[in-house]
């Protein structure tokens, strides 16, 4: 959607075409990644959702409410503004956006680094969050990804705005992920590939914590916070200096 001051001009036409291409590509990516969530066991379909922002148009594409794997396709994805309201009279507008659209829109407005969002209810992460206990950092991979333990956020789920407030607050201290009791994981990234990787890493970390907890207390087994922070920073520098590296947690210490 071109800016109003160039609408009707050559620049406006070019901007409009560019926006339409970006929207079409984003629809396809969101549909593909939404299917990946179920295929990788990160959601109990139709729970969980993904979205991706279209920066030039101040819009985002999100999966529709109640979407099942066999019905996922680009044309079924819903185009929303940054208030989480579906745009009328466009492809997919006959469907309601995911019930989490308000949370996604709030993240896009308040977390500048978020270009894509993944919400999962993966089993180990959900089970750990139910304890309302911080998820310890037990492995080098978790340290590289999260830089230390991941706090569990507890909020009033009966209050519509409370969840969005809680997630944004959690992302202020842990910029890539929020783990919410009773709700699951909200992972953000520069794109959906990164956001899904982060959500997957958290599920693995929660599974490790659960398995280790069966043999005794976890506190003595967690990595030192300073060590975890060093590993995270080293992985971050490696990712930014290596063209093919995707992000922290890419296995730096094992290469």
Image (tube, helix red, strand yellow):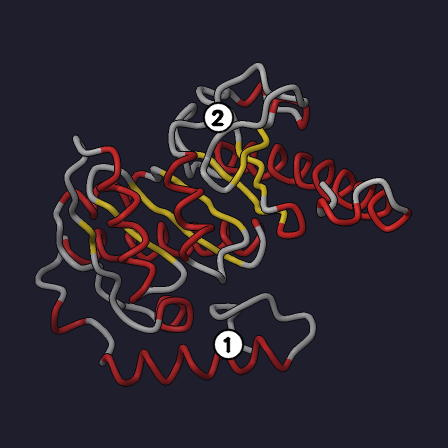
Q: Is residue 133 shown left or right of residue 66? A: left
Q: Please, is residue 73 above or below residue 222 in the view?
A: above
Label placed on residue 97: 2
Name the side, left or right, on which 227 lies relative to 58: left
User: Which residue corresponds to the image point at 46% horizontal and 35% vertical from the top-left?
Assistant: 84
Characterize the local packing of mark 2: few (<14), some (14-19) or many (20 or more) Cα atoms within 10 angstroms. Answer: many
Kindly give the residue lying farthest to the left in the view shown.
217
Residue located at (62% from left, 52% from top): 55
Q: Quadrant of the C terminus?
A: bottom right
How many labels, in total?
A: 2
Label 1 belongs to which residue?
254
Which image quarter: residue 24? top right
Q: Extreme top residue here?
A: 94
Assign the N terminus to one quadrant of the image: top right
Vertical comparison of 220 with 109: above or below: below
Per the model, the C-alpha gap separating discs 2 and 1 is 41 Å
Q: Determine the secondary structure under disc 2.
A: loop
Q: Residue at x 58, y 27 (%)?
A: 87
Residue found farthest to the right: 10
Mark 1, other Cα within 10 Å: few <14 / some 14–19 / many ≥20: few
Q: Residue at x 42, y 58 (%)?
A: 111
Q: In terms of secondary structure, where does tag 1 sit?
A: helix
Residue 232 percent location from the top left of the image: 40, 77
């Amino acid at each position: 959607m071109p800016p109003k001051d160039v609408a009707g001009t050559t620049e406006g036409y070019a901007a409009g075409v560019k926006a339409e291409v970006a929207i079409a590509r984003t629809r396809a990516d969101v549909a593909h990644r939404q299917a990946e969530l179920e295929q990788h066991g990160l959601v109990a379909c139709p729970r969980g959702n993904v979205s991706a922002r279209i920066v030039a148009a101040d819009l985002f594409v999100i999966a529709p409410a109640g979407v099942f794997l066999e019905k996922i396709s680009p044309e079924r994805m819903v185009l929303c503004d940054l208030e989480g309201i579906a745009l009328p009279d466009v492809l997919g507008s006959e469907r309601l956006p995911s019930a989490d659209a308000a949370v996604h829109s709030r993240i896009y407005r308040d977390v500048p680094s978020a270009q894509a969002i993944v919400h999962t209810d993966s089993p180990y992460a959900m089970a750990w969050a139910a304890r309302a206990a911080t998820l310890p950092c037990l492995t080098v991979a978790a340290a590289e990804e999260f830089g230390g333990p991941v706090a569990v956020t507890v909020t009033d789920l009966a209050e519509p705005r409370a969840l969005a407030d809680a997630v944004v607050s959690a992302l202020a201290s842990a910029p890539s992920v929020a783990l919410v009791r009773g709700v699951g994981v909200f992972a953000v990234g520069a794109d959906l590939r990164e956001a899904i990787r982060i959500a997957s890493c958290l599920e693995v970390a929660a599974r490790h914590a659960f398995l280790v907890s069966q043999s005794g207390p976890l506190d003595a087994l967690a990595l030192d916070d300073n060590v975890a922070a060093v590993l995270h920073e080293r992985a971050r520098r490696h990712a930014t200096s290596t063209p093919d590296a995707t992000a922290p947690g890419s296995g730096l210490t094992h290469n």
